[in-house]
Amino acid sequence: MSKPSLPQGTRDFNAATVQKRQYIFQTIRGVFELYGFQPLETPAMENLETLMGKYGEEGDKLIFKILNNGLDNPQKRAQIDEGFAKVVEGKNSSSITERALRYDLTIPFARYVAMNHGQLTYPFKRYQIQPVWRADRPQKGRYREFYQCDADVVGSESLLNEVDLLAIYVTAFKKLQLPVEIKINNRKILLGLAQVCGGEEKLIDLTIAIDKLDKIGWEKVKEELNNKDFSLAQQEVVERYLNITGTNTEKINALAILLGDNENGRKGMEELNYVLDYYVSTGMHENLVADFTLARGLNYYTGLIFEVKALDAQMGSIGGGGRYNDLTSLFGVPNIPGVGISFGVDRIYDVLEEKNLFPASVEQSTQVLFFNLGEAEAKVAYAQMGMLRDKKIACEMYPEKSKFDKQFKYAEKKGIPNIVIIGTDEVANKKCTIKHLATGKQTTVSFDELVNFQF
RNA sequence: GAGGGCGUAGCUCAGUAGGUUAGAGCGACAGUUUGUGGCACUGUAGGUCGUGGGUUCGAGACCCAUCGUUCUCCCCA
């Protein structure tokens, strides 16, 4: 038997970690519900067909596929061999694999909406908090199993949904006391730029190049544009586009001049303006930054797009989202527009941990440890402990009669703040001794008083 | 998919140009102390040096392979 180990990129979570994670989940869930979203859960695995082709070429490679059962069936040998040959060539074959672990929560949600669109009440607002899996190579802030918390609205084109979702971001991060910047852009603006610079079909090349600006710098971006056959005049437009700075309003004004009367650009700015303006009136706009370099990878976005970055932290984005016009048409149900956001819990955890932002209260557990001083004493003490538990005070009893030393140390290790001693004397007098470990303060009270003692 | 770093006790690590029986701190356990912890002292247990091969009289150290882990790029939460 070799040493037990964990699959790459997965983790166990100890008590303290789980409690801190719960704190994040509860905070986000609370905000989702406050804004009228209702929970949904979908299976860990989906049909491979549901997921393939939705995340781009790179994304497809990162989907965890599940090997079919019954591959050893001799009667299907020929079919399986044929399928295996395909798989080796990088294609999928349903005779080898037809299920996969979910890669995100948005596509399973779209699948759910497509399957149930007749029964749903629109606008349909759901939130979902579940793990997703990616066969990525793990590194800082990147895991193979991680949680996402998504909120989406489908069946409404109103920009009020965007306003609501951005308010959720602002509220949730405020509650977590994590300073963030929410970048916001519009795919229509990028589309407009592409049209001004040589055509719609260059949108993908253009966004990929633009997205790299803060990593590789303008010179390299220019080089990349050159390689993709953008003319010098077009490159100059892109340069002017990327050099736009100032307040949100100033940026939009500058952009309006640059894109002229391009229809998509105008529409994109109008939407951006609408949302930002809403925030100015609610006083929540301080975290929102118009950023025309924001592109986002997932190619199903069509309107406003968002990305959240923790301020002063070495961490990629901790959340993202945007509007998609027609996601469910991938599953045969057209004309259901939607918009959604996602929180990356594991990265939020890492940032909160790094910045020491978890409240001390999240780690509290047992309040009182009852010492075990022998069979008869323990029995009396157990009854007293039951009454405290009825009062919702978390208690436990040391399971065996051990030396004081050992029982004290147990309480200390576990961070239990109080101990109660019920020994022979206490049983005879119907009293017990309460000791607060941090102060060493000791109090003797009757059994009747114990129930109402303020620990 | 490409490229670096690191794998020595339960944990954190040391181990000098290859040289006897591989060390420390913390932790665990026992005792000093059988109803009052944290401190201190004493002692005990715990290691196929990730794995496999090679070089050498001799390998924890050097070489090759492999596995694991971590980080960067790509991409993303």
Image: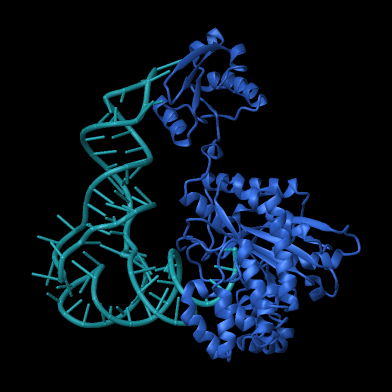
Residue A300 shows up from this direction: no
Front residue (pair A269, B12):
A269
Q: Could you say where residue A185 lies in the image, as x and y percent from the top left?
A: 65, 67
Front residue (pair A448, A73):
A448
Q: Which chain corresponds to the colour cyan?
A: B
The image shows residue A439, relative to residue A66, as above or below, that is above
Q: Could you say where residue A414 lies in the image, as x and y percent from the top left?
A: 48, 36
The image shows residue A49, relative to residue A101, as above or below, that is below
Q: Which chain corresponds to the colour blue?
A: A
Q: Could you say where residue B10 lies in the image, as x and y percent from the top left?
A: 39, 52
Quarter of the image with the C terminus of chain A is top right
Question: Which residue is farthest top?
Answer: A429
A214 on left or right of A341: left
Residue A330 shows up from this direction: yes
Q: Quadrant of residue A125?
A: bottom right
In the image, what residue occupies the spot 78% across and 49% down?
A36
Question: Which residue is farthest right?
Answer: A118
Q: How is the image coloured?
A: by chain
In the image, what residue occupies the spot 64% across and 85% down?
A197
In this rendering, the count of numbered labels is 0
In the image, what residue occupies the spot 55% across and 86% down?
A225
Front residue (pair A322, A192):
A192
B57 on left or right of A451: left
The image shows residue A248, relative to residue A196, as above or below, that is above
In the image, what residue occupies the spot 69% across and 53% down?
A279
